[in-house]
């Protein structure tokens, strides 16, 4: 599902080519002295003096790499520095992996990688100067003492509704949220404006969602490149040791409107009503009441067993339910509820879900998309859907959502 850099664990010190000379921890680039140079010392070679009259020698070029040895600290950019002259090119490559891209400084004396070195990875360094000198060095980083992982939604190559956020739940706590957020690159086919916002998932885990300022436009193509390999999430969180990538497409422009006071549910597509049916929602005045605000269709689960004890309502019910569509983690669904037919269009008399006839629920199940917004209005509610109870980000103003970014 995701592309990942392959990490080669270091088991032995790196061997340097025989022609590599070490001078106080630096590598020497360039050609060796000619036989008629009189055997100049390393210091003479470094200064470009000491060769015999009438002969010539290639300039003596030295580089140093900030990360060295077999247990270098990960999470830092790789920096290659030239003692004299100018660099032409530098390549830093993970063994059997990808090269780190980077930039040569304006004065040509140093090169710095765009990304940091990942833990438990062996790297080779090859540098060439403008005078033709070339040599190679290498290092490996220490293994991660703890690894952090994540779960992404929506799934790769899926088509979703106009309210679907990009959501990431982390296995371990994320203390350095700014570093993680900087590594999350969202691109869209139409330059959609959006922002990351940090929150606590209903599970209690750290989570970050990216939502657009307004509902997505149909047909938008969305890509996430989570370039996390080598990022330390902070104390108790651990290192990320791979990158993640996912893409999805925005489908039909659909909104489901649920009116708790009128006991009606309507599906609108491209601004036109394609369904308008009676329903019965949660009994008002207590925990059985429904939530108001915007909920997002999380999953079309079909026929499932619903038990009241799983949502803290004792032994009130235990039954198989058809055409089930999950709206919150706390257990609010839209589904078929033929046992409640006497209340459809008349009163809210369920245990919190939006119930319809078998036929109406089946029709909505067929037409609805994961990611469709359910805009729930009315007085007969127990509160507003929280941001972490499913995808409740739409119940926060745009300014307040932007303020949840670690980079705001």
Image (cartoon, helix red, strand yellow):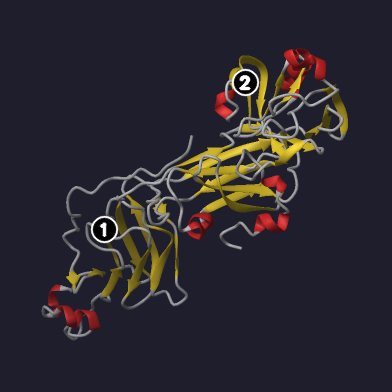
Residue at mark 1 to residue at mark 2: CA–CA distance: 64 Å
Residue 32 vertical placement versus 186 (above, below): below
Res 379 → quadrant: top right
- The reply to whether callout 1 and callout 2 are in contact (CB within 8 Å) is no
Q: From where the camera sits, is residue 251 visible?
A: yes
User: Which element is circle 2 on?
Assistant: loop
Res 35 → quadrant: bottom left
- Give percent across and percent down for residue 371: 68, 34
Res 140 → quadrant: bottom left
Q: Nearer the viewer, residue 200 or 84?
A: 200
The residue located at (40%, 49%) in the rendering is: 240
| Location of mark 2 (residue) | 316
Q: From where the camera sits, is residue 189 visible?
A: no
The residue located at (45%, 46%) in the rendering is: 243
Number of on-image labels: 2
The residue located at (46%, 58%) in the rendering is: 176
Q: Nearer the viewer, mark 1 or mark 2?
A: 2
Q: Residues within 10 Å of mark 1 (few under 14, many from 20)?
A: many
- Give percent across and percent down for residue 5: 39, 44
| Location of mark 1 (residue) | 139
363 sits left or right of 249 in the view: right
Mark 1 and mark 2 lie on one chain; the one further toward the N terminus is 1
Q: Nearer the viewer, residue 321 or 15?
A: 321
Q: Which mark is residue 98?
A: none
Q: Residues within 10 Å of mark 2 (few under 14, many from 20)?
A: few
């Amino acid at each position: 599902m995701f592309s990942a850099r392959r990490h080669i664990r270091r088991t032995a010190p790196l061997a340097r080519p025989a022609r590599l000379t070490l001078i106080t921890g630096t590598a020497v680039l360039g050609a060796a002295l000619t036989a008629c140079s009189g055997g100049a010392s390393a210091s003479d070679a470094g200064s470009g003096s000491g060769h015999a009259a009438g002969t010539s020698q290639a300039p003596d070029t030295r580089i140093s790499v900030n990360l060295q040895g077999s247990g270098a600290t990960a999470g830092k950019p790789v920096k290659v520095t030239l003692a004299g002259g100018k660099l032409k090119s530098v390549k830093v490559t993970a063994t059997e992996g990808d090269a780190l891209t980077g930039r040569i400084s304006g004065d040509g004396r140093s090169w710095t990688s765009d990304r940091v070195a990942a833990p438990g990875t062996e790297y080779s360094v090859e540098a060439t100067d403008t005078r033709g000198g070339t040599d190679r060095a290498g290092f490996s980083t220490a293994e991660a003492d703890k690894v952090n992982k994540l779960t992404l939604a929506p799934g790769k190559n899926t088509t979703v509704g106009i309210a679907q956020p990009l959501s990431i739940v982390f296995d371990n706590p994320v203390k350095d949220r700014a570093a993680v957020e900087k590594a999350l690159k969202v691109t869209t086919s139409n330059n959609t404006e959006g922002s990351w916002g940090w929150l606590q998932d209903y599970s209690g885990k750290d989570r970050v969602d990216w939502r657009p300022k307004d509902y997505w436009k149909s047909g938008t193509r969305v890509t996430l490149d989570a370039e996390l390999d080598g990022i330390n999430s902070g104390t108790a969180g651990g290192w990320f040791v791979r990158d993640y990538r996912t893409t999805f497409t925005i489908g039909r422009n659909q909104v489901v409107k649920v009116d708790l006071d009128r006991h009606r549910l309507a599906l609108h597509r491209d601004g036109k009503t394609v369904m308008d049916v009676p329903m019965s929602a949660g009994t008002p005045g207590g925990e059985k009441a429904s939530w108001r605000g915007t909920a997002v269709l999380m999953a079309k689960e079909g026929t499932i067993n619903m038990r009241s004890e799983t949502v803290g309502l004792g032994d009130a019910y235990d039954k198989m339910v058809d055409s089930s569509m999950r709206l919150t983690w706390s257990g609010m669904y839209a589904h078929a509820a033929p046992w409640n037919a006497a209340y459809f269009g008349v009163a809210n008399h369920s245990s919190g879900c939006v119930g319809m006839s078998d036929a109406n629920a089946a029709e909505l199940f067929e037409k609805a998309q994961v990611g469709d917004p359910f805009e729930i209005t009315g007085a007969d509610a127990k509160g507003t859907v929280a941001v972490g109870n499913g995808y409740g980000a739409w119940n926060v103003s745009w300014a307040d959502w932007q303020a949840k970014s670690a980079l705001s």
